[in-house]
Image (cartoon, coloured by chain):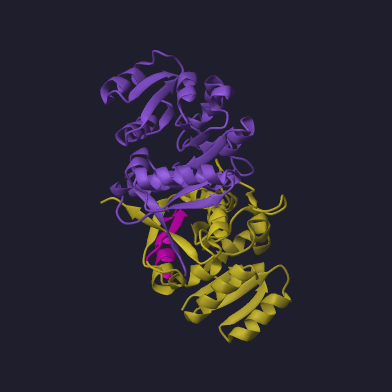
Chain colours: A yellow, B purple
Amino acid sequence: MMKLAVLGTGMVGKAIANKLVALGHEVVMGSRTADNASASEWAGGVGERASHGTFADAAAHGEMIFNCTRGSVSLQVLEAAGAANLSGKILVDVSNPLDFSRGMPPTLTVSNDDSLGEQLQRAYPDVRVVKALNTVNCDVMVDPSRVPGEHDIFVSGNDADAKSRVTTLLTEGFGWPKVTDLGDISTARGTEMYLPLWLRLFGALGTADFNIKLQVAS
Amino acid sequence: MMKLAVLGTGMVGKAIANKLVALGHEVVMGSRTADNASASEWAGGVGERASHGTFADAAAHGEMIFNCTRGSVSLQVLEAAGAANLSGKILVDVSNPLDFSRGMPPTLTVSNDDSLGEQLQRAYPDVRVVKALNTVNCDVMVDPSRVPGEHDIFVSGNDADAKSRVTTLLTEGFGWPKVTDLGDISTARGTEMYLPLWLRLFGALGTADFNIKLQVAS
């Protein structure tokens, strides 16, 4: 049993938090205010291992913290969570820097020579940021068997031990058959910039229940 | 037999041109000058269906034209090829807007709310631009069996007939089992922005002989 935090009360936050509670972990869902209706309803419906509070409450509780907020607000959310509550911990950054303000499909607020994962890592140098899961829909994140066959998920981060711990949770907990380590946190540029292709594939395929499988010559 | 043009004398241009000649087509490889040594050597080594000339010579010859130049110079190349020589024809845009000037890995010169495919289409409205093949290494483009199993390739473009003709060449000629139509030319943003992930996968996998397979829930 781990003490875990989920920042964000949207579909992604709830999918991740539900899965973590189902795996037996003690989860605090964090939001901007302590009385957030969505977080309160979630915690009330899930049982005794689930509770909710502010971003700071959640971050103080978690030994591993999932950033499931919109990428456009993630830096503000971490500021609200508080550097002292984040220090030394693993931050699993599930978010994407999508900008919906210019219509559909969204563009990225940061790309090419930087990424949201790197922005978070730079803002909190002693936090161990691991970019993960941001290349699939939230339902697939926590239940890869929704998509047939084997398919792939990635981690990016500067801390090998943190990536190893996240990989273990993804394989043994979430059911991913394997996790590909892309390298340091700058490789988050790759998975974040995949999102525009994901969005076009979503349009062409007509479902979010898809993913990519790496086929590699031996 | 088709009359085809390949713009560009690099690895991608030669791989595509070799394949097109092997399929029985009559190919002119275009370059900046009529006496380009690389193009001359290529044409001399391939046989009577291969010749070379300026970008304009090649474009005038081709009923279908492959843009295999570096993305950073593609607009200049099309200008040299000449609007009259391109008019009404299918332009298969294989290139990616990679910018190597800021070190490795390269960034993209255009992304997010525009793409190279769209830039070419806007510059030449009566050319039928089809973005294709830019998501794999040139060896895989023309021989998908280098990578085991089934895996996927995409087309983007505004002209359904042009996409259909390119798809037929890719399946019956190049050996792709299937081609996924992502939609209009703006979907080239998706496949071009996949390149940063491709580059990181290349680094993590240690080979360019890979591709992605779409796994989709039924």
Which residue sits at x=62%, y=80%? A51
Q: Residue A41 appears at what percent x and percent y?
A: 68, 81
> In the picture shown, does residue B80 fall above or below A71?
above
Is residue B194 visible to us here? no
Q: Residue A205 appears at what percent x and percent y?
A: 53, 61
Which residue sits at x=67%, y=76%? A39
Q: Is residue B65 magenta?
A: no
> In the picture shown, does residue B133 fall above or below A153?
above
> In the picture shown, does residue A77 fall above or below B185?
below
Q: How many marks?
A: 0
- Whether residue A211 sits left or right of residue A204 in the image: it is left
Which residue sits at x=36%, y=21%? B51
- Whether residue B163 sits left or right of residue A44 in the image: it is left
Seen from the viewer's position, the closer of residues B177 and A197 is B177
Q: Is residue A157 magenta?
A: yes
Identify the image quadrant of residue A138. bottom right
Is residue B54 visible to us here? yes
Seen from the viewer's position, the closer of residues B140 and B50 is B50
State the residue lying farthest toward the top: B35
Start and end of the magenta stretch?
A: A150-169
State the residue lying farthest toward the front: B1
Identify the image quadrant of residue A215. bottom left
Q: Residue A118 appears at what percent x and percent y?
A: 55, 49
> In the picture shown, does residue B48 fall above or below B107?
above
Seen from the viewer's position, the closer of residues A50 and A61 is A50
Q: Residue B180 appears at what percent x and percent y?
A: 47, 53
Which residue sits at x=35%, y=56%? B150
